[in-house]
Image (tube, rainbow, N blue to C red):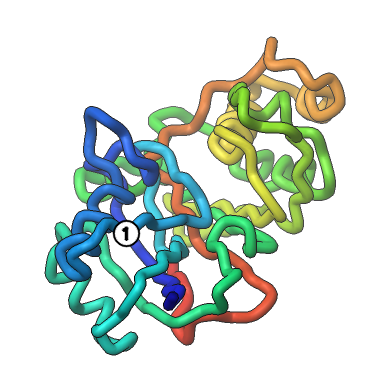
Amino acid sequence: MPNIALLIEYDGTNYSGWQFQPNSISIQESIEKALLYLYKTKVSVISAGRTDAGVHSCGQVANFKVENNPIPIDKIPKAVNSLLNPDIRIINANYVSDDFNARYSAIAREYIYKLSTKYSVFERNNWHYIPFKIDIDKLFEIATVFIGSHNFTSFSKNNPDTKSYVCNVEHSFWEKVDEHHYYFTIKANRFVYGMVRTIIGTMIDYARGYKSKEIIVSALNNLSRNNISALAPASGLYLYKIYYPNEIFSTTGRK
């Protein structure tokens, strides 16, 4: 049975997130409906990461299996895209091994967050605009605190299905794009529910002078959600790239 991997980008503004929801439209549902039309049979799509409502992606990976694939592999993106809204696009498709699983075969995931200090109507769904003054130097400084293996209970939302909150963060840093725009990049072997947006909310609190570095470092050890920062808005968050032991696409995610 062919196992096919897809590289996907989407603007999550109008969706309830990746995962199927009974009373709203999700990215997963949209893609599975397109595949149902193409293959005339129900197809289940497994993603590398279940992004929340409003979160975007330029490097989501998913896979599905079908009994028979009459469509040439290089024609699949165009065929699926013809059935999708223009805010979801299949960028690439490739055959993968039978045991490949987009979620469990991944060895790392990378997110970026787009922050702006100048409001623009054209960026309101894809950047997080901050209407107050922040210390950019402090924002850049605090990012390194999260590097390494930590229990991120204090920087996540409770999820009964999560067996461990320990994640190994490989890198965590900010970059200046221009006078008003900044990128945050974080890469880890895994992420827990709400982790990236909570970390960003915490860093913003620090840059505003609302939290000290000592409190943030202590929170990494206390494993308590009593002093948790508000989650940063979903509009600025992008699932940027999924890492596997071997590259499976010639095209990668992009900023």
- On the image, which quarter does residue 8 sit in? bottom left
- On the image, which quarter does residue 213 sit in? top right
Q: In the shown orientation, is residue 187 left or right of residue 254?
A: right
**Residue 182 appears in the figure:** yes
Image spot of residue 18 (x, y percent): 38, 46
Q: Tell me which amino acid carries mark 1.
A: Val
Image spot of residue 237 (x, y percent): 45, 46
Tally of numbered discs: 1
Near mark 1 (Cα within 10 A), the count class, few <14, some 14-19 or many ≥20, is some
Residue nearer the viewer, 160 or 89? 160
Q: Quadrant of the C terminus?
A: bottom left
- On the image, which quarter does residue 160 sit in? top right
Residue where numbered disc 1 is placed: 43
Image spot of residue 146 (x, y percent): 76, 43
- In the picture shown, does residue 210 fall above or below 133? above
Q: Quadrant of the N terminus?
A: bottom left
